[in-house]
Image (cartoon, rainbow, N blue to C red):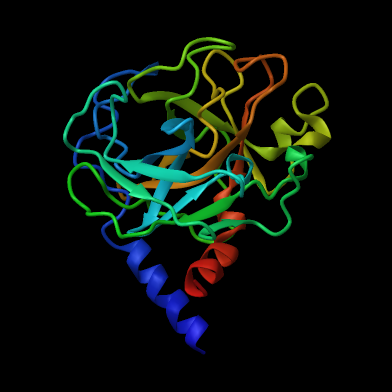
Amino acid sequence: MLLRLLSSLLLVALASGCGQPFYSPVGRVVNGEDAVPYSWPWQVSLQYEKNGAFSHTCGGSLIAPDWVLTAAHCISDSRTYQVVLGEYDQAVEEGSEQVIPVNPGELFVHPRWRSYCAACGNDIALVKLSRSAQLGATVQLACLPPAGDILPHQAPCYISGWGRLYTNGPLPDKLQQALLPTVDYEHCSRWDWWGFTVKTTMVCAGGDIQSGCNGDSGGPLNCPTEEGTWQVHGVTSFVSGLGCNTLKKPTVFTRVSAFIDWIEETIASH
């Protein structure tokens, strides 16, 4: 009963005041260009410590004041992490950043994730922050879709992140965004596309010039709603081994709507 109550409260929290950027993300045509600063205010940089300094490793989405949604393959129990919110240009101290440590033991990887098999699915994880984020114009909560929600073919979603600009290319300082229309399961599972590699618990998007790349992992696939808000429908999971922008090999995301129950239960029990 308590778990049900907590889950209901979480749903209320995530349904109100989320997915509404103060700065419009689509004020101009963008195809893998610099994002409008702070226009994806739930975007986080997940960083790990190496030789006394923290470095960006993955993206993520702030879904509650003290919870971040990311990819399971971004998480290692042997590493020390921090999350940076309100970030745009990683080369500049802009004054909007919130740097929040992550305590050991506060990393929750989906129990059916297998690190040797990204194509098996369940590439999703939750990170509990050591303190709550301060919400404002540059830091806001993401909205999540209803459980089981399936996007139509060619839905106009955007990927955002600090991943490589092209295969084996440099990492950008400024947050990037690209329009990645979704590819439904019927198309994405065709033999000359992803075939059996893609599962129904995944979302495909892109598959041509624009795509995700190394460093975008864990970050959001942001999709518009009819009400004018945004929902995070995907967690960036993997791209083709042939390269980040390979024809008929869309970026593959974990489908968030397939894991709403697990997200709610994990947050409610911790």
Q: Position of residue 125 (x, y in %)?
A: 57, 52
Number of numbered tags placed on the structure image: 0
Q: Is residue 252 left or right of residue 195?
A: left
Q: Is residue 6 left or right of residue 71?
A: left
Report if residue 189 is visible in the image: yes
Q: Position of residue 119 (x, y in %)?
A: 76, 38
Q: Nearer the viewer, residue 203 or 270?
A: 270
Q: Nearer the viewer, residue 15 or 10?
A: 10
Hey, which quadrant is residue 137 in on the image?
A: top left
Q: Residue at x 19, y 38 (%)?
A: 96
Q: Position of residue 139 (x, y in %)?
A: 25, 46
Hey, which quadrant is residue 175 in on the image?
A: top left
Hey, which quadrant is residue 109 in on the image?
A: bottom right
Q: Nearer the viewer, residue 9 or 132?
A: 132
Q: Residue at x 54, y 22 (%)?
A: 211
Q: Is residue 199 left or right of residue 267?
A: right
Say if 119 sits above or below 2 in the image: above
